[in-house]
Image (spheres, coloured by chain):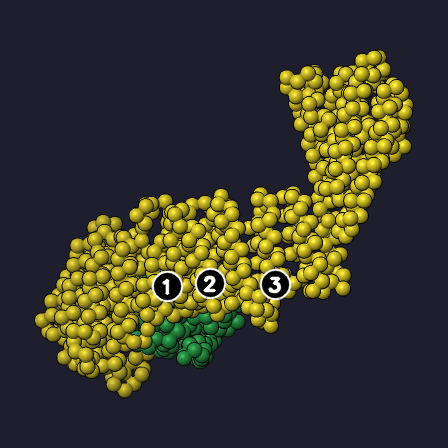
Chain colours: A green, B yellow
Amino acid sequence: MVLVLALGDLHVPHRAPDLPAKFKSMLVPGKIQHIICTGNLCIKEVHDYLKTLCPDLHIARGEYDEETKYPETKTLTIGQFKLGLCHGHQVIPWGDLDSLAMLQRQLDVDILVTGHTHQFTAYKHEGGVVINPGSATGAYSSITYDVNPSFVLMDIDGLRVVVYVYELIDGEVKVDKIDFKKTSSNQSTQ
Amino acid sequence: MMLDGTEDEEKFLAAGIAGLQQNSFYMHRALDSNNLRDALKYSAQMLSELRTSKLSPHKYYELYMRAFDQLRKLEMFFEEETRRGCSIIDLYELVQHAGNILPRLYLLCTVGSVYIKSKEAPAKDVLKDLVEMCRGIQNPVRGLFLRSYLSQVSKDKLPDIGSEYEGDADTVSDAVEFVLQNFTEMNKLWVRMQHQVGKNLHVLSQIEGVDLDMYKDVVLPRVLEQVVNCKDELAQFYLMDCIIQVFPDEYHLQTLDVLLGAYPQLQPSVDIKTVLSQLMERLSNYAASSAEVLPEFLQVEAFSKLSNAIGKVIEAQPDMATAGVVTLYSSLLTFTLHVHPDRLDYADQVLGACVKNLSGKGKIEDKKATKQIVALLSAPLEKYNDIMTALKLSNYPRVMEFLDIPTNKVMATVIIQSIMKNATRISTSDKVEALFELIKGLIKDSDATPNDELDEDDFKEEQNSVARLIQMLYNEDPEEMFKIIETVRKHILTGGPKRLPFTVPPLMFSSLKLVRQLQGQGQEENPFGDDSATSPKKIFQLLNQTIETLSGVLAPELALQLCLQCAEAANDCELEPVAYEFFTQAYILYEEEISDSRAQVTAIHLIIGTLQRMHVFGVENRDTLTHKATGYSAKLLKKPDQCRAVYACSHLFWVDDHDNMKDGERVLLCLKRALRIANAAQQMANAARGNTGSVMLFIEILNKYLYFFEKGNPQVTVAAIQGLIELIMNEMQSDTATSDPSADAFLATTMRYIQFQKQKGGTVGEKYEPIKV
C-alpha cells in the first residue's frame, strides 16, 4: 500500500497564514510515500515544509507561485497507476469536467489531479478519475464561496485506489472515502 | 573562621601579638649580639604565632603586619651577615632547620630575598624554588599571606628588562612565569577560602533552631555586619550572593528591608546590580512556584521596596552601563509579572522607570543592551500570550523607541511570532494602528539608514511574516473591518516598491473577503445611506487605487492577476462598470507591461478564464473585451501557444448556463482559426526543419470539436469532425511526419472515448453513431 498525499492552493501568505493546526498535527513525516501538489503554495517556506513530510515531492505551477520553475504539467507512475498533475488555471472553462477529461486523455493518465477552484471534487468517467483536493488552507477563491480547508490522501494498492478526503468543517476534521478500481494496466479505470 | 565570639577573636589576637612581641624582643637581643643561632630560634618562635587558625583574615592581617615589620629587620641583618662574609648558601640551609614549616618558609623567603640580591644564583632559580616550596601551605588564610609576603619581598628583584637581575639565563618570561605561578596558587587558595566562608553560612541555614525570628533578629544582622565591615568588594559580592542562595526565600521576603538596606553600605565597586537581579530572580521563581505565597509579597510590599532599591542603586552608580540598567529593570519586570500578574500598572511603572533612565541616550546600539531590551519586551509577551495586553502598557512602545533599526526588526518579528503562535485576532483599527507603529521597522525604511544591506532571503522572510500578520487582522463588523483595511493600507503604502508586492496581495484578499461578506448581507439594506456605509463599491475604489501602486516595473503580472480577481468579485456584485474598469486595467497592463512570453501565456489563460465566467457585461462590453482577448491570443509568440489560446477563446462564446451566450458560429470560427494556426505551424516546421511537426495540436482541436458537438452546437457537424479525423490520420502517415508517442497516445485515448460514447446508448450514443473511427 502506497500513500500519496494530494493537496494544493494553500496561498500562503497571500490568502492564508498557514495550514490549519489540526491538519498539521495529522501530517506527520515518514508516513507518506509521495506528495503531489497542485500548486499555488506560494512561498519557499511551504515547499520546505512539504519536503520535510516526504522527500518525493511533485509540484505543478500555479499562477501565484514564487518559484517559476515548477512545470505546467507533470506525469508520474505510482504502482499500477499513471498520475497526471496540473494546476488547472490553464484548462478553460475552469473546473469544467469535460475539459479536464480532455487533459486527462492528452496526458494519458488514470488519475488526474488538478486544483485552482479550491473545491474538492472526485469525478469518475470512462477515461479515469479526476481529483481536486481543494485548498488545504481554505483560501479565498473567486470561483468557490465558503471554502473549507481540505486535502486528499490516496491509498494505492495494486489495481485499487481508495481516495480519502479530509475536510475541516466548523473546526472538526471530517473524512470521506471513495473507491476506484482499474480492470488492468492497459485499460481505463472503472 | 567562626562568626560567634568576636570577643574571643580579640583575645586570640591580643595573645598572638603579645607572643609575637615577646619573641621579637629576644630576637633583637640576639641580633644585637650577633647570635645568629638564637636570632633564628626566636624568629621561628615569633613566626609560629602565624600558625594560628583562630583568626579571621581581617585579624590575621594585623598579626601578619607586625611579623612583616620584624622580618624586615631580620632581612637587613642577613644582608649585613653576607657582607661580612657569611655564605648565603649556608644561611639558606640553616633556616631550613626551623621546626615547623610555616616559620621555615617565611625565613626561606626572607633569606631568598637576600640570596637574589647577592647574585650568587640566578634570580629565576631562587624564585622558582620559593614559589614551589610555598605549596607546602595549603591552608587558605596562611597560604595567602605567605605568598603575599613572597610577592612583597620579590617584587623589586624580578629579572625584568633593564633590571640588575636580568642575566643571560634570566628573562622577562621567567619573571612573568614566577608572578603568574604565585598568582595562580593564591587564587586557588582564595577560592577555597571563599567556599569555607560560604560553607559556614550553609551550616547556619541548616540549623533547625534558626527559624525566621532568629534569622531576623540574630543571624542576618550579624552576617551583614561582617559583610559590610570586611570592606572587600569581592568578598562582599560573594557573600551577599551566598546569603541569598542559602537561606529560604520566605526569609528574604520578610527581611527585605534589612537586606536592601545593606546594599548601599557595600563598597561602591561591588556589582550590586547582579546581586539585586539574582535576588529578584529567586523571588520571581518563588512566586511562580505556588500561588499561595503571593499574598505574602503583597503584605511586605515587595514590589515598591525593590523598585525603590533599584532606583537608588542606579542613582548611586551614574556610570552603570546601559545593559546593566536594563537588566535590573528586566529582572524587576519578570518579578512583577510573576507576583502581580494582574497589576498591569505595576508592569507599566517598571517600563516607565526604564524609559526615564534611558531617555537622552538616543538609539541604543550596544549589543548587550539591546539584547536586554528585547528580553525586557519579550517578558510581557510570554506572560500574557497576547500582544494586546502588552500594548496596554503605555510605556511599551516608548521602550521600543530606543531600539536601533535591526533590533527593532528583531523585536517586531518576536511580536509577530507571538501573535501567530497564539492565533491572536487583532480586531480594531486602533489596535492595528498601535501594532503597526510598534513594528514599523518591518513596514518601512527608517529615515536614518538605507535598507539595502539586508540579505534577500531574510527580507523575503520578513515581509512574508508581515503578510501573514495581515491575515490575523479581522473584525466581523464590516464597518470596523473596513477601517482596519484602511489603516493597514495607510501603513503598507509607506513601505516602498520593494515591500508592496508582499504586502498588497494579503490586504487585497482581506478586502475581497469583506466584499463577499457584504454581498451575503445584501446590498439593498443600506440604512445609513450610500455615502457613509461600507459598500463593495467603496472597497473596490480603494482596491483600484492600491493595485495601481503595483504597476510599472514593479510587479505587473501580479497587478494583472489582482485586477482580474477584483473584476470577478465585481461581477458577483453586479457592478458592471467596476468590473469593466478592472478588465481595462488588466488589458492595459498586458499590452504595456507584460512582455515575457511565458508570462503572456499565463496572463492570457487568466484573462480568458475570468472573462468566460463574467455574466455581468452587456453585449457591447463583452464583445469589446472578447475581441481584444482573441486578438492577444492570436499574437502570442509561439504558434502552439497561439493555437491553444485561440481555441480556449472558443469558450468565450459558449457559456453553459446562459442560453443567450451560446453563439455556435463564433465558436466554430475560433476553432477554425485555431486549425489554420495549427496548419501554419506544420508548414513552418516543414520549412525550418524538413519535417512536419507533431499532430498534437490537431488532436487537441479535435477534442474541442467533440466537446461542442456534445454540447449541441449545431455548427459543429459530424462531417467536420470526420474531416478532422482524416486530416490527422493523413498527417500521421505522411513521409515527413515526426513520430510523437504522446500524440499517438492522445489519439488512442480520444478514439477510445468516441467508442465509449457510441456504446453509451441513448441520445449520446445516437449522436456519436455516425462518426467512423
Q: Is residue B426 above or below residue A167?
A: above
Return the x and y of residue B52 as percentages of the image width and height: 82, 41
- Residue B253, disc: 3
Are circles 1 and 3 on residues that touch, CB within 8 Å? no
Q: What amino acid type is highlighted by mark number 3?
A: Leu
Query: B578 or B231, which is in the foreground?
Result: B231
Are circles 3 and 2 on residues that touch, CB within 8 Å? no
Q: Are marks 3 and 2 on the same chain?
A: yes
Q: Quadrant of residue B186?
A: top right
Reading the image, the residue beneath label 2 is B347
User: The residue marked by circle 1 belongs to what chain?
Assistant: B
Reading the image, the residue beneath label 1 is B469
Q: Residues within 10 Å of mark 1 (few under 14, many from 20)?
A: many
User: The residue marked by circle 3 belongs to what chain?
Assistant: B
Residue placed at 22% from the left, 81% from the top? B522
Outermost residue, left direction?
B620
Return the x and y of residue A30 as percentages of the image width and height: 53, 65
Q: Is residue A146 above or below residue B244?
A: below
Q: What amino acid type is highlighted by mark number 2?
A: Ala
Disc nearest the viewer among 1 and 3:
3
